[in-house]
Amino acid sequence: MLPLEFGILEFDPSWVGSWTQKSLRDWRSKPGYELFSIVVFGSIVNEGYLNSASEEEEFCIYNRNPNACSYGVTVGVLAFLTCLLYLALDVYFPQISSVKDRKKAVLSDIGVSAFWAFLWFVGFCFLANQWQVSKPKDNPMNEGTDAARAAIAFSFFSIFTWSLTAALAVRRFKDLSFQEEYSTLFPTSAQP
């Protein structure tokens, strides 16, 4: 299909049909995937702790529970680092020649993604519960409430993105199993 030219811009409509399995498989390498974890830990670090005029120490906006803020920051930072680790694995993946090693990489992707989906679910429930029972007298000026809500919302969104990643990894594992079966049934040396 020929590209359409609009002045100095060029539009190639053939990309619409080019959404292949590879583009779905490379979901983690798309920009913005790591954004959810950055929003969660960034909003808690920036505005998740408040100072009171009557107290010297700052306290967590989530019901004065320091465990809620610590959990959100810890899960956010570790999820971001995990995203970077698996992004590097996605870059290295085509260079892995052994089907068994590829299977191990994909199995680890399935397990880690499912584990992070669970951790984000726990984080969402914990932060939402602590936010629900927070007392208005602890924050009369409503400072940091938008950041607290953003952390809760992006924790919720992260459940689905990590679950989608696990589902796509399961699909990738099925494809690798098919490739292994195919290569044992029809070895390349048998072809003329």
Image (tube, helix red, strand yellow):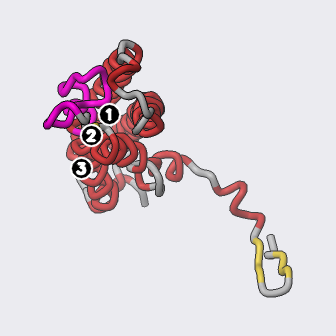
Q: Mark 1 or mark 2, which has the lower sequence index?
A: 2
Look at discs 2 and 3 and give the one toward the viewer. 3
> Label 3 is placed on what type of residue?
Leu
Q: Is residue 98 visible?
A: yes
> Label 2 is placed on what type of residue?
Lys
Q: Mark 1 or mark 3, which has the lower sequence index?
A: 3
What residue would you read off at disc 1? 113
- Residue 148 magenta-drawn? no
Which residue lies at the image location 28% right of the left edge and 40% below the top edge? 76
Q: How many labels sit on residues?
A: 3
The image quadrant of residue 174 is top left
Q: Secondary structure at mark 1?
A: helix
What residue would you read off at disc 2? 103
Task: Please tell me how crowded label 2 is: few (under 14), some (14-19), or many (20+) other residues with Cα within 10 Å.
Answer: some
> Label 1 is placed on what type of residue?
Ser
Task: Please tell me how crowded label 3 is: few (under 14), some (14-19), or many (20+) other residues with Cα within 10 Å.
Answer: some
Which residue lies at the image location 47% right of the left edge and 57% below the top edge? 31
3D distance between C-alphas at marks 1 and 2: 15 Å
What residue would you read off at disc 3? 81
**Viewer-closest of 102 and 140:** 140
The image quadrant of residue 171 is top left
- Residue 52 percent across, percent down from the top left: 25, 34
- Residue 148 percent across, percent down from the top left: 40, 33
**Viewer-closest of 82 and 27:** 82
Task: Please tell me how crowded label 1 is: few (under 14), some (14-19), or many (20+) other residues with Cα within 10 Å.
Answer: many
- Residue 57 magenta-drawn? yes
Given contact means CB atoms under 8 Å apart, are the residues at marks 1 and 2 in contact? no
Q: Quadrant of the N terminus?
A: bottom right
Magenta segment: 54-73
